[in-house]
Image: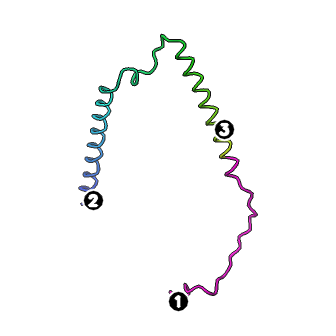
Amino acid sequence: MTGVGIGIVFVILILLVLVLQIFTLLAVKRAPAGVVQGIPASDPASSKVVHEDEEEMAAAIAAALFLQSEEAHDQESGIITIVHNDHSNWHHFK
């Protein structure tokens, strides 16, 4: 019984991979040449714009990571306080 279940899972995974490959082939055939190929290397002005955009993107990512790391490290006291609440009804569910 377990072998049948594992077999069904593998067959479904193989079918999923095949369906995704078919969708990829269809998307490449339907996409315009500029979208799939990127910017032609023969246009130096276009490659400079892409290079500047990549530098700006890297700077933006670095700034976001720095700001996130600054917010992630709060100063904690390291003391855990457990307060017992006598008004709770949880002790009835033993």
Q: How far apart are the alpha carbons under marks 3 and 1?
A: 53 Å
Q: Which of marks 2 and 1 precedes in the sequence?
A: 2
Q: How far apart are the alpha carbons under marks 3 and 2?
A: 51 Å
Residue type of the residue flagged with mark 2: Thr
Check residue 63 in the rendering and tell me which mark sits there, or answer none: 3
Q: Residue at x 59, y 85 (%)?
A: 88
Determine the secondary structure under disc 1. Answer: helix
Q: Which residue is drawn at 52% across and 16% down?
A: 46
Check residue 83 in the rendering and tell me which mark sits there, or answer none: none
Determine the secondary structure under disc 2. Answer: helix
Q: Which of marks 1 and 3 precedes in the sequence?
A: 3
Q: How far apart are the alpha carbons under marks 1 and 2?
A: 42 Å
Which residue range is magenta in the image?
69-94
10 Å crowding of disc 1: few (<14), some (14-19), many (20+):
few
Q: In this view, does 51 lie to the left or right of 9?
A: right
Determine the secondary structure under disc 3. Answer: helix
In the image, residue 62 lies in the stretch drawn in magenta: no
